[in-house]
Amino acid sequence: MKPVMTIEQLHDLMMREFPQMAENFDVTEVRDDGATVRMFIDNSHLRPGGTVSGPTMFALADCAFYMATLAMIGPEALTVTTSCSIDFMRKPRPGDLVGDARILKLGKALVVGDVMIHSIHDHNPVARASVTYSIPPKRTEIGVS
Amino acid sequence: MKPVMTIEQLHDLMMREFPQMAENFDVTEVRDDGATVRMFIDNSHLRPGGTVSGPTMFALADCAFYMATLAMIGPEALTVTTSCSIDFMRKPRPGDLVGDARILKLGKALVVGDVMIHSIHDHNPVARASVTYSIPPKRTEIGVS
Amino acid sequence: MKPVMTIEQLHDLMMREFPQMAENFDVTEVRDDGATVRMFIDNSHLRPGGTVSGPTMFALADCAFYMATLAMIGPEALTVTTSCSIDFMRKPRPGDLVGDARILKLGKALVVGDVMIHSIHDHNPVARASVTYSIPPKRTEIGVS
Amino acid sequence: MKPVMTIEQLHDLMMREFPQMAENFDVTEVRDDGATVRMFIDNSHLRPGGTVSGPTMFALADCAFYMATLAMIGPEALTVTTSCSIDFMRKPRPGDLVGDARILKLGKALVVGDVMIHSIHDHNPVARASVTYSIPPKRTEIGVS
C-alpha cells in the first residue's frame, strides 16, 4: 500500500469537487497507511456550553477517511461510505480538530480502517471512528461520500 | 416507559437551547418507545451528484435519538452521545429525511436504541443508526449532545 | 424480497455444512424480510453468576443473520460476515435465546440488517446486533460465516 | 493509566473465575495502555474450509479487552461488556490468534478501546473490534463479561 496522490492533489480535488468541504478541512499529511486532516472549528460547530458537536466530529472522520482512501486508490474512484461506528470519549473544547485516518484493509470492494480524532488542545483522543467504504465495481467518476 | 414531554415542549426546548438545530429539524411525533424527527434538506446538505451527505444523516440520527431520550427522561438531563454506529444503505435523493428513533433500553446510566432514516421520496430505509447516550449521575442542566 | 429457501432446507443445510452449529441452533421461522433462530443454552454458555456470555449472544446474532441471508439468496452463495456491531442491554438469565433477524438491504454485494435477541424468560431485548454480510462476486460454494 | 495487576494475577483470576475460558486464552503481555491475549485455536473453532469462525474472534476480542480493563482497575470490579463493533477483514487460516487490546479512555463509568486481532501466520490484521465496558457504581464482586 502506497499513496498515489499527494497532499496538493488531494487539496485540489477537494476544492474542485467539494468546495463546501474545502473551506472547513485541510489535508496536512499523507502516509503509507493513511492521511491526516485538520478541521477548522468555528462557532457554527459548537453546542451550548462550548463543546464541538457530534455531527462535526463525524464529518471530520468521514472526510479524513475519504481523503486517505483516495490517496491510495486515486481520484477516479466512486467510493461511498458504507458504515461508520464512532465512540465519543471526551468533550472537545473549542478549537481545531485533527483526524488521523489509518487504512487497515484496502480490498477490491471494501476499504476498512479507523480515524482517531483529537483536539489541538488535548493530547488524549476525543473520538475514534471505525469506517468502511465500498468501491463499486465500475469506477467512472469522482466519489460521493 | 412513557414520554414525559410533548412535541410542543421538545420544540420549545430545541428553539431555546439549540437555535441552530431548530432551523433544520422538526419533531413530528412522540411515542411510548420513541419519537420521529423530520430534517429539512437544502443545498447545503447535498454532495455533488445530488445525494444527501453522510454527516447530514448522522446529524438527523443524533437529533432524533436526543429528542426521543429527552421525551422519556425530561428536559433537565445532561445527556451525551456515547457512541453511534451507522449503516448507509441507499443514497437518498434530494428531499427531506425522516428519522424514527426507538428506545430499546432506558437505563439509569445508559440509553440504547436505534434510528431508522428514510427519505420522503422512498419507502426503503436509507440509513440505520444504533445509538447509545449516557446520562451522567448529576443531572443539573440541559444536555449537550 | 421473498425467501427462496424453507425452514427445512435451511435446517438440512446447517446439518450438512455446519454440524457443530446445528446442535445449538434451530431455525423456527422464515419471513419475507428475515428469519428467527432459537439457540439452546446449556452450562457451557454461562458465565459465573448464571448469565449467558457475550460471545454466545454474538454467535446467535451471526447464525440468525446468516440463515436469513441464505433464505433470501439461496444455498449456493459464498457469504462472509463483514461487520457486526452489538449492544448488550440486559443480562439474560439462563434459558434459551431467540434471535429475530431482519434484512434491511439485500444488495448485490452487501446484505445489511439487524438481529434482536431476547430470552425466552424476558420480553425485553437482551441484545441487538447490526450486521453486514458481503457476497463475493463469484458464487461457487457454500458460505463460511 | 498504569496497570495494577500483573500477567500472573490475571492468569490466576481467569483460572479461578472463568476456568472454561482459561483453557483457551493466555495473557502474554500487560502494557501501560493495554494487554495482549493469545487464543489457542483448535478444530472446534474452525468453519468448513478451515477458517476461524467469527464468534471465535469475537470471544478473543472480548477476553482481551476484559483482561486489559481488569489490569487497569483491579480484580474487584464488576464490569460488563456494553457494546462491541467488530470488522472482519481477512479470513484467518487455522492457527492461534493474538489480540492486542488498547484502552483509549478509562472513565469512572465507561472504558473504551479497541482490539486488533491477527493470526500467528499473518502480519496483517484479520479483525479489529471497538469495545465499550461499563463499570457499575457499586464494585462488589468479580465481573461477568
Image: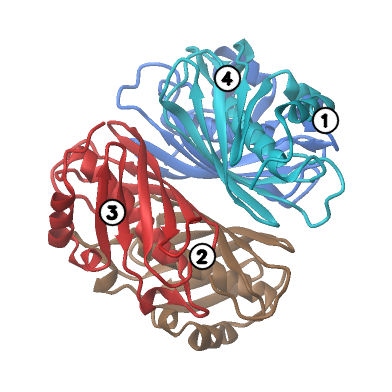
Chain colours: A cyan, B blue, C brown, D red
Which mark's residue is nearer the viewer, 2 or 3? Answer: 3
Name the residue that disc number 4 marks.
B14
Q: Gap between marks 4 and 2, in whole Å?
A: 36 Å
User: Which element type, helix, strand or loop, lies under badge 3?
Assistant: loop
Q: Do the residues indicated by labels 4 and 2 lie within the same chain of the protein?
A: no
Which mark's residue is nearer the viewer, 4 or 2? Answer: 2
Name the residue that disc number 1 marks.
A17
Toward the viewer: D58 or A69? A69
Name the residue that disc number 2 marks.
C100
User: Which element type, helix, strand or loop, lies under badge 2?
Assistant: strand
Question: Given the image, on which type of amino acid does mark 1 rest?
Answer: Glu
Instruction: Tell me if residue B14 can be seen.
Output: yes
Q: Position of residue C74 (x, y in %)?
A: 67, 78
Q: Do the residues indicated by labels 2 and 1 lie within the same chain of the protein?
A: no
Work out whether D138 lies above or below C118. above
* Residue at 65% in and 38% down: A68
User: Which element type, helix, strand or loop, lies under badge 4?
Assistant: helix
Name the residue that disc number 3 marks.
D145
